[in-house]
Amino acid sequence: MLLSWLPGVAAVLGLVLCADGIGHTGDRHRPPAAARPTTPHTAAEPHIVPRSVWLDPFARHAQPPPRYDDKVVAVFVHHTDSPNGYDCADVPRIIRYLYAGQTDARNWDDIGYNFLVDRCGTVYEGRAGGVGRAVTGAHTQGFNHRTAGIAAIGTFTAGVPVPKAMTDAIAAVAAWKLGLADVDPRSEAHLVSSNSLSRYRSGTTATLPALAAHKDAYSTTCPGQALSARLPAIRQQAARLQGRIP
């Protein structure tokens, strides 16, 4: 992305070629190390329940075509601030309720989250546009571009248990989405705030975790202290799913 260093590439490659040629006269056809392609760190796409399972066609709101970014370089984790003691069979109904709250009460054009994860570890497609594409969401004020939002269904304030199936699913989605752009979940992302209602004035470049809590970018307690405390372990697990660590 930083094109300013390109003029020096030829000189660097020349040094690499010279160094590689010393003492390797019998291996002249081997490509230099700098020219060998690197293997991207990707992860398998988890099973994702399509939005057609939860979206009531008779309650659907008119919405404009989806908006897209070039790639996803960061993921924000949320909680829905809704009850925890649900039956997982009722999750489609719960998501319909969340959708209605965001499109009716908030007058949004669609549900804001790209993905939702229940306590049983099931992943649901949220915002329309295609799970494999970089769909611009409406989940993190000021930082919806080049990011994806994953909402944990429930409320995870201090002391509330966070189901392992849920954190496993969050790690799997994050590993897959970030892997499409070869982003390490343990790394940092440089994102430009588009809205001064975020923690950063509009136009400011913020350095945030590539796998971040909602509260890292916006003045909120979301995704709750209990789930926020699990994020370091989720980052490690996501990196492991990408093959970056054993």
Image: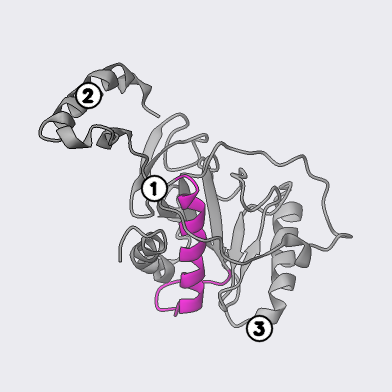
Per the image, label 2 sits on a secondary structure element best described as helix
Label 2 sits on what residue type? Val
- Which dot marks residue 39? 1
Left-right relation of 162 to 63: left
Label 3 sits on residue:
87
Front-most of residues 42 and 219: 42
What span is colored magenta in the figure? Answer: 153-181
Label 2 sits on residue:
12
The spot of residue 6 in percent (x, y) is 33, 20
Q: Does residue 26 sit above or below 90 in this rendering?
A: above
Per the image, label 3 sits on a secondary structure element best described as loop
Quadrant holding the C terminus: bottom left
Q: Earlier in the sequence, mark 3 or mark 2?
A: 2
Q: CA distance from mark 3 to mark 2?
A: 59 Å
Q: CA distance from mark 1 to mark 3?
A: 41 Å
Q: Earlier in the sequence, mark 1 or mark 3?
A: 1
